[in-house]
Image (cartoon, rainbow, N blue to C red):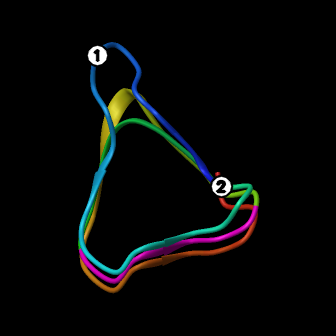
Amino acid sequence: MALIRPINGISPTYGKNCFFAETAVIIGDVVMGDNCSVWYNAVLRGDVHYIRIGDHVNIQDGAI
């Protein structure tokens, strides 16, 4: 299961029908739309600044 966790009291949120690979990491102020995917070894860290991702977005393997 992907690592999805809060940081500084802010948790990631995501829409419907999203896929997270087992080794994906999603932390902090990250907001994702519907039908998104985060693939193997990708890291989304919303610790210093926020991350906003729209609908139908694909974060590929190893993206940091």
Residue 9, labelled with which disc? 1
The quadrant holding residue 59 is bottom right
For discs 2 and 1, the disc positioned in front in the rendered view = 2
Helix, strand or loop under label 2: loop
Nearest the camera: 23 or 50? 23
Q: Which residues are magenta?
A: 34-40
Q: Would you place residue 5 above or below residue 61 in this image?
A: above
Which residue sits furthest front?
Answer: 1
Q: Position of residue 6 (x, y in %)?
A: 40, 27
Quadrant showing the N terminus: bottom right
Residue 60 x/y as whole percent = 64, 74
Give the vertical position of 58 relative to 4 (above or below): below
Q: Residue at x 40, y 75 (%)?
A: 18
Of residues 64 and 37, the one nearer the viewer is 37
Q: Residue furthest top?
A: 8
- Residue 26 placement (x, y as % from top left): 51, 45
Main SS type for the magenta part? loop
